[in-house]
Image (cartoon, rainbow, N blue to C red):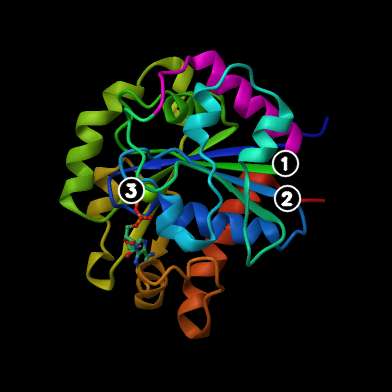
Amino acid sequence: MANKQKQMLAVWGSPGGGKTVTAVKLALELSKRKKNVVLVFTDVTAPTLPAVVSEKKLPDVSVGELLAAPGMTQEQVLKTCVPCEKNPYISFLGYKAGENVFTHAEYSKEKAVDMLVLLRHIADYVIVDCTSLLTGNVLATTALEVADDVLRVCSCDLKAISYFSSYLSLVADRKFKPEQHIKVLSNTRPYQGGSEYENSFGGVKYRLPYLPSLEEQAATLKLLEPLSGKEAKTYEPVIAAIAGEVFGDGK
Ligand SMILES: Nc1ncnc2c1ncn2[C@@H]1O[C@H](COP(=O)(O)OP(=O)(O)O)[C@@H](O)[C@H]1O
Ligand SMILES: [Mg+2]
């Protein structure tokens, strides 16, 4: 019997460790299949959308508004999705510039579940960029629970080791299936090539290298552009392999 097609990936990991960069690059990779991808940004502490797409081009919508409003219909979700100007297959759901945790009324876990279920109907693929600070972030915590897979992004720094030693106990519950997380070492510099970090994270399956050009893309609102040159060849096959493991070959 064929495996059930996986459709939703939650990306979670240490603060500043490359969750957003990895989520965007995975969305770009999936868009090559000419299928629709919705990328959900759950960060309300530092809204992600204005850091990925030029603020001037953003419509006045917010996932916070959607979650706080009464009801949850496909139409409401579609109205809140921001189409990506650079790629017709990608759209975003996220908080807008200036919002914070007090901007909207609190919402229930059921509301988050309803939204994620609707997204499964709307899109071929859903990637949820979860926050490191899960406490109080119902959407991110719900996504960790209901996604088909979780990519655990572990950056090569001592802060990441400290983060996981504190936070893993918070996702230890069976509902989060932590032992099934797919671990990726992210933003790896050549001098971090040894196995010390891998061992501290209990083994990792993938390694994403540090690319100066990717750092530049992130700083100049160009993450949605393809990488080029030799560097790309060290990075893109890893993204393609993760997409393949999670979402199959798309056929
Ligand atoms: N593979 C990478 N190569 C180079 N820089 C990276 C890479 N991954 C992340 N970064 C840098 O780290 C910063 C933080 O990454 P980001 O994805 O925003 O972290 P998070 O979402 O986990 O907080 C980015 O702005 C970028 O400068
Ligand atoms: Mg982020």
Front-most of residues 21 and 51: 51
Query: x and y percent of residue 33 in the render?
Result: 75, 59
Between discs 3 and 1, the one toward the N terminus: 1
Residue 5 horizontal side relative to residue 111, left or right: right
Between discs 2 and 3, the one toward the N terminus: 2
The disc placed on residue 36 is 2
Residue 202 horizontal side relative to residue 111, left or right: left
Residue 219 at least partly seen: yes
2 or 3: mark nearer the eye:
2
Between discs 2 and 1, the one toward the N terminus: 2
Q: Is residue 116 magenta?
A: yes
Q: Which residue is mark 1?
A: 123
The disc placed on residue 154 is 3
Query: x and y percent of residue 237 in the render?
Result: 56, 67
* CB-based contact (under 8 Å), mark 2 and mark 1: yes
Look at the magenta stretch and give its main secondary structure. Answer: helix
Query: x and y percent of residue 123 in the render?
Result: 72, 41
